[in-house]
Amino acid sequence: MQNNPRKQDIIQELRGKRQDVTELCTEAEAVDEPHTGSGIVTDCLYLNVRKLPDINADVAVVIDVLAQVCVDLDASTEDFYKVRTSDGVEGFCMRKYIALSK
């Protein structure tokens, strides 16, 4: 049984495409971009940005109501959002005081 040259070309082309998809998936997984969002301080006049996600942790900075923060959803916990203020300070705020923007 002879090999059809066109068939071999098609098989080679498909193998190349499969390799391209595999490489793209691997690259996408390697980048592993964090899920971030924008949030606004609500339901309080001032909000503590803590150094750790714990109510008793040291306060890094205090921000005002309506202050905007960048929220790292991947690094957040059940009770605290990991945030970065407009001044670049990173820390944790209680979730109940941050309204996520859509």
Image (cartoon, rainbow, N blue to C red):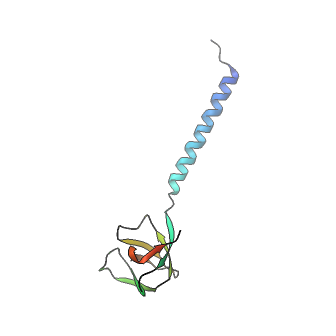
Q: Is residue 74 visible?
A: yes
Give the residue furthest to the left.
56
Q: Residue furthest right?
A: 6
Is residue 19 shown above or below 69?
above
Q: Measuring from the top left, give residue 55's x and y in whole percent.
A: 31, 78
Of 45 and 73, the residue lying toward us? 45
* Image location of residue 82, percent across then percent down: 42, 72
Q: Residue furthest top?
A: 1
For residue 3, which quarter of the picture? top right
Relative vertical location of residue 11 with respect to residue 42 in this rendering, above or below: above
Residue at the front extreme of this rendering: 43
In this image, 101 relative to 78: left or right? Answer: right
Work out whether 5 lies above or below 97: above
| Residue nearest the viewer, comparing 61 with 3 | 61
Q: Dividing the picture into quarters, in which one does residue 75 lie? A: bottom left
Q: Residue at x 53, y 57 (%)?
A: 31
Q: Position of residue 61 (x, y in %)?
A: 42, 85
Q: How many numbered tags mark residues here?
A: 0
Q: Is residue 59 above or below residue 96?
A: below
Quadrant of the frame with the N terminus: top right
From the viewer's perspective, tell me whether residue 31 is left or right of residue 55: right
In the image, 47 versus 30, the foreground residue is: 47
- Frontmost residue, 5 versus 45: 45
Identify the residue at image location x=51%, y=54%.
Answer: 30
The residue shown at (55%, 43%) is 22
Q: Position of residue 58 (x, y in %)?
A: 34, 82
Residue 94 seen anywhere in this rendered image of the structure: no
